[in-house]
Image: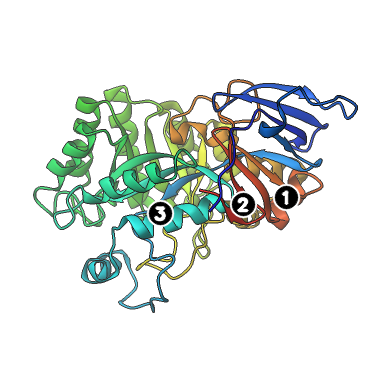
Amino acid sequence: MTSSPDVTVIRNVRPWGGDAADLHVADGAITAVVPHDATAAPAEGAMDGEVDGRGLLALPGLVNAHAHVDKSWWGKPWVSYGGEPGVRARIAHERAHRDELGIPGVDVTLAVLRESVRTGTTAVRTHVDVDLGVGLRGIEVVREAVAALGGAVHAEIVAFPQDGVLRRPGVLELLDRAAAAGAEHVGGLDPASIDRDPVGQLDGLFAIAEERGVGVDVHLHDGGELGAFQIELMIDRTLRAGLQGRVNVAHGFAVGQLAGSRQADLIAAMAEAGITMTTVAPIGAAPLPLLALREAGVPVGLGTDGIRDLWSPYGTGDLLALTTQLARLSGLRYDGELVTAARVASADAARFVGREVHDLVAGAPADVVLVDAENVPDAVVRAPARALVVAGGRVVARDGEVLV
């Protein structure tokens, strides 16, 4: 591994495919975006912190809004898929075999985070398992791995009850402890089909959120009217608790399965309650109505879900490649729609990682990804290699080599 000095200016890049510009940087943030002047000489003594962008397309750092970085076996010898399909069966299989793979472990978490950084991810919301077997150790592991990267990736943590909440007495208390210790969100999982008590699970989660001042992020695989009913319960609790803007539905397959006015009414109610959604662009599931959600004012984030874990051998951590998949599954073809997909995976996901702004503008964190692409639609459909990744004003990857 090598290191690089703090960046002072990234010269001659095309932010969002626009005119050539220079991004000035100080203290890890973008301080100015000015038109590039090819005739201007560099400031005296500035060469060490200057980066030549070579006219490449610049995007904000990619934001993984739904990850499980504590679960991966990335970097270990191949692990053959085993167990049976279905959420309950995958939970049981993971619980039976995670210890033999050293999961959760700092080494494997660090490996998958470094791979994510290599492909341009600079911020992540990660669900971290909290259960009776592992306690809060997974959260400690993730924090240690993130710290080891020295600011290359910003992370928010969801304390996630993968094995259920109410069906495992003591888990609700663990979630409360995690929130008290600094986890930014508490998670839930299929309140109806896993705990068989949607009211009870959601009441418990929202009570913690109100008491500890954290967000709520619920995995919801239940489809159709069963899933819609649980979203309606979340809408009601969000409004009553005053948690607008702090509640997220992950997956939410039901929204994509509903039709006509039923779907439109549910989306409108979610928008009124300030509820957000995250998707992992899964193949084989009814895609979320991405454009309808955004038009109604429901923010949508994109995430990788698990990456090479005991749930599935698939996943690379490359969020730009996943953006290509999101665009295809959502039927996006027009240039403006493809730009929307890129924004979902970057600038518009600021709220999912606790940032007010995450873009190529003054005041934003200096998180920048450079790619050799004609324009943003070209970058979305091809997902070209990341030529340079800057995080917090520091070069953290260059031409496929991670520098942290």
The numbered disc on residue 340 is none
Up the image or down, 94 lies above or below 127; here it is below
Image position, residue 265 (x, y; %) = 47, 36
Q: What residue is pinned by disc 2? A: 320
Q: Secondary structure at mark 2?
A: helix
Q: Amino acid at mark 2?
A: Leu
Q: Nearer the viewer, residue 45 or 88?
A: 45
Image position, residue 258 (x, y; %) = 47, 50
Q: Are marks 2 and 1 in contact (CB under 8 Å)?
A: yes
Q: Secondary structure at mark 1?
A: helix
Q: What residue is pinned by disc 1? A: 379
User: Quick one: label 2 or label 1, which is nearer the N terminus?
Assistant: 2
Q: What residue is pinned by disc 3? A: 110
Name the image quarter holding residue 99.
bottom left
Residue drawn at point x = 44 percent, y = 35 percent: 353
Mark 2 crowdedness (10 Å alpha carbons): few <14, some 14-19, many ≥20? many
Q: Is residue 280 left or right of residue 32?
A: left
Image position, residue 37 (x, y; %) = 86, 26
Q: Is residue 242 left or right of residue 340?
A: left
